[in-house]
Image (cartoon, rainbow, N blue to C red):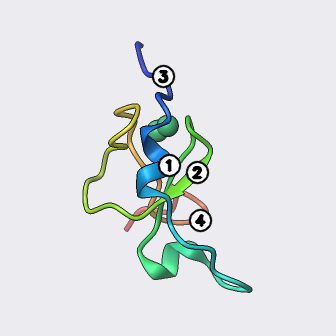
Amino acid sequence: MGYSCKGVCNDFKGEKIPNGSRYLYGQKRCTLCSIFLMVQSVRCPCCGALLRTNPRGKKQ
Ligand SMILES: [Zn+2]
Ligand SMILES: [Zn+2]
């Protein structure tokens, strides 16, 4: 509830990784903003949603 993309995520956007999993490079995906982020937090600095840290949602 109340999560929304404010465009702040663009400031934390992860760099493009050709032919590689961005998760391996420590990037996390915000499903709400539909963007990969380079952040330490487990939450999106933009919308506050929990970030995905691995491709298939496997338990770590
Ligand atoms: Zn956003
Ligand atoms: Zn977000």
Position of residue 54 relative to residue 19, above or below, is above
User: Marks 2 and 3: in contact by CB < 8 Å?
Assistant: no
Residue at the extreme left: 41
Q: Secondary structure at mark 1?
A: helix
Q: Between disc 3 and disc 2, whose residue precedes?
A: 3
Nearest to N terminus: mark 3 or mark 1: 3
Residue 3, position as x, y percentages in the image: 43, 21
Which of label 2 and label 4 is nearer to you?
Answer: 2
* Disc 1 Cβ-to-ligand 1 distance below 8 Å: yes
- Say which amino acid is labelled 1: Asn
Which residue is the site of mark 1? 10
Badge 2 marks a residue whose secondary structure is strand
Residue located 55% across and 35% down the image: 32
Which is closer to the viewer, label 2 or label 1? 1
Q: Nearer the viewer, mark 3 or mark 4?
A: 3
Q: Quadrant of residue 40?
A: bottom left
Q: CA distance from mark 4 to mark 1?
A: 21 Å
The span from disc 3 to disc 2 (Cα, nearest Å) is 13 Å
State the residue position of label 3: 4
Mark 2 or mark 1: whose residue is earlier in sequence: 1
Left or right for 52, reference 20: left
Q: Along the horizontal axis of the image, is 43 left or right of 12?
A: left
Instruction: Name the kind of residue labelled 3 in the image.
Output: Ser
Residue placed under numbered mark 4 in the picture: 55
Circle 2 packing at 10 Å, graded few (<14), some (14-19), many (20+), is: some
